[in-house]
Amino acid sequence: MDILEFQHYLLYRPINPTDIPVNVIALADRLGPPQAVVWDYRENQWGYGTDLAVSVLYANQERHTFNRTDRVMAESVTHHFTTVPLPSEAELTRICQEASPTRPAPGRCPVRAAIPGQRAWRRRMPQVSRRHCRSREG
C-alpha cells in the first residue's frame, strides 16, 4: 500500500472566520483525483470527505474560510472540535482507500456533517448549501 501525501487545511465558520477552526481537511491530490478526510460531526469520527474538500477548496472558495497549514498545526487544533487525534498519514490513506469514491452515503450532505451549527450557516448561504445538498440526496 502506497501512503498518500496529504496537505492540511483549517476550516473556519463562515460567520466568524477569526474564531478557532471547526474542522481539518486532509487532502491528497497529487496521485490522481482528490481524496480527503475530515472530522464527521454526525458520525463522531474521521471519515472520507472528498465532496466537502472539493466544495470548500475548489468549487466555492469565496464562500468558505480556510487556511493551508502544516500537519503539526493541524494536529494541534483538533482538540477544539474532537478528542480523537488527527489520524496518521497511513491511517488517512486507509480511510481513503476503503471509502467509495463514487458517491457519499445516501441522504447525507457532507458540508452539514463537517461544520457544526450548519443550519444557521445554511440559511445565510442558501445558493451553495441547498444546491450542494440537493444534488447529494435521493
Image (spheres, helix red, strand yellow):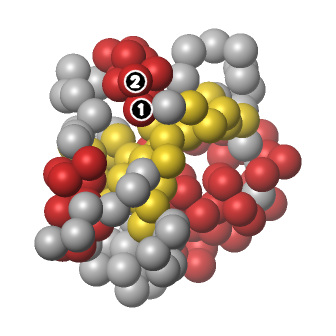
114 lies left or right of 41:
right
65 lies left or right of 71:
right
Q: For label 1, count other residues whose C-alpha is less than 10 Å away and answer few (under 14), some (14-19) or many (20+).
A: some
78 over 87 or under it: above or below:
above
Q: Is mark 1 in CB contact (under 8 Å) with mark 2?
A: yes
Disc 2 secondary structure class: helix
Q: As shown in the figure, which amino acid type bears the numbered disc 2?
A: Val
Q: Position of residue 103 (x, y in %)?
A: 39, 81
Q: 123 or 83, which lies in front? A: 83
| Residue 48: image tag | none
Q: For label 2, count other residues whose C-alpha is less than 10 Å away and answer few (under 14), some (14-19) or many (20+).
A: few
Residue at the extreme right: 62
Residue 10 lies in what quarter of the image?
Answer: top right
Disc 1 secondary structure class: helix
**Quadrant of the rendering where the C terminus is positioned:** bottom left
Q: Where is residue 95 in the image (x, y as percent from the top left)?
A: 22, 61
Q: Name the residue under label 1.
A: 71
Residue in view at x 50 percent, y 31 percent: 70
Q: Mark 2 points at which residue?
A: 72
Residue in view at x 39 percent, y 56 percent: 5
**Quadrant of the rendering where the N terminus is positioned:** bottom left
